[in-house]
Amino acid sequence: MKRMLVPVLAGTALALMLLSLTLGPSNIKLSDTVAILLGKGASANKAYIILQLRLPRILSSFLTGAILGLSGAVFQAALRNPMADPFILGISSGASFGVAVALFIGIAPLLGLPVSALVGALGTTLFIVALASRRKSSSTTLLLTGVAVNYILSAAMTLLMFLHKEQYQRILFWTLGSFSSSTYGQVVVVLFAWIILFIPLSLNHQSMDMLLLDELSARAGGLSVRRTRLLFLLLASFATALCVSYYGVIGFIGLMAPHATRLIIGPKHQKLLFPSSLLGGLLLLASDTISRILLPSGELPVGIITSMLGVPLFLYLLHRGRYFYG
């Protein structure tokens, strides 16, 4: 099962992509979808729907899920907490809050939404790292602090929406998450972000393993714990913030993907990182497909689907006491 995990996830993801390209209100057959992808004859209308509307959305959702799966593995290793992920610890909300503030004070055209999201995410990350550097801070304390940060930022965004009603819809977009406006340009940027995140993590998988040890043992092994933790968290926060700036806050993918993968292949990051990324992409692609076809007219925000999947796991882990390493 361990050796077959990556091929199974990759094959399932490709099959789901093909199915997702076909599903929808346009009544396109699977044979038509395959013909369009192979460049064979098909109506221009169907080709436009498949290639210009659905394909960039599917690629965006899969790559975003892959980034969130990797980021979750980083947060869980850096904070020694299997329940940590960018959403629960407020990193995604921090990025969304940065966008909301930029829209509210009118500097979004100057900074750009990705930069605004990055500032918010990195500020939240530094706050979490500062707490993690305190010797007496347990993983449970950090987890509850992240939940508190989420509540604070959610309340602040609600206040901004109330005070700046003309930007209500744009701010609400980032609080719920959606891939409806995906473009090929965004796909290229998100793919580049995944590469920037994956390669350094893969090259430093042993350092990630050492972060799971207690701090004294990691230092005895020659690891600069604080610097390594900060670099990893900032790298993951940057990639998460980029996804948030395009598609909004999407929760629990970073919790579910690494945790499920770890149960199958163990905690060694050399084998954990790529399957976690694949499973994250698969989970988010499936969630976006469900959100797109569930309603007869219109669609649900994808964040609702991921929360419905992730919250039961979160509660289960709390009930079982699986909130620490060691």
Image (cartoon, rainbow, N blue to C red):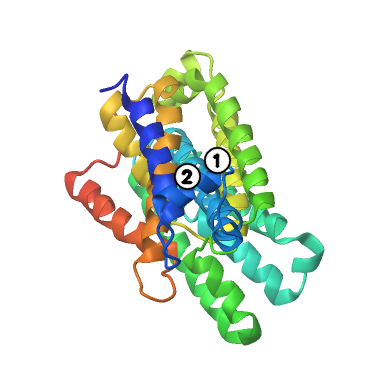
Quadrant where the image shows the N terminus: top left
Residue 136 visible in rendering: no
Name the residue at 59% across, 65% down. 97
Q: Residue 210, percent across and down?
A: 44, 21
Please tell me whether residue 10 is drawn above or below residue 45 in the rendered image. Answer: above
Residue 52 visible in rendering: yes
Q: Residue furthest right?
A: 110
Name the residue at 48% across, 18% down. 206
Q: Circle 1 — which element?
A: loop
Q: Circle 2 — which element?
A: helix
Name the residue at 57% across, 44% down. 40
User: Mark 2 and mark 1: span between their CA atoms?
Assistant: 6 Å
Query: In the rendered image, which quarter is residue 271 located in?
Result: top left
Q: Dot 1, crowdedness within 10 Å: few (<14), some or many (≥20)?
A: few
Please give left or right for residue 27 compared with residue 108 in the image: left
| Residue at which label 1 appears | 38
Q: Residue furthest front?
A: 41
Please tell me whether residue 291 is drawn above or below residue 282 in the rendered image. Answer: below
Q: Dot 2, crowdedness within 10 Å: few (<14), some or many (≥20)?
A: some
**Disc assigned to residue 312:** none
Quadrant where the image shows the C terminus: top left
Instruction: Name the residue type under label 1.
Output: Leu
Q: Residue 276, percent across and down?
A: 41, 34
**Number of numbered markers:** 2
- Viewer-proximal residue among 42 and 175: 42
| Residue at which label 2 appears | 34
Please tell me whether residue 267 is drawn above or below residue 306 in the rendered image. Answer: above
Please give left or right for residue 215 compared with residue 236 in the image: left
Please give left or right for residue 124 compared with residue 186 in the image: left
Instruction: Name the residue type under label 2.
Output: Val
Marks 2 & 1, CB-CB < 8 Å contact: yes
Q: Residue furthest top?
A: 221
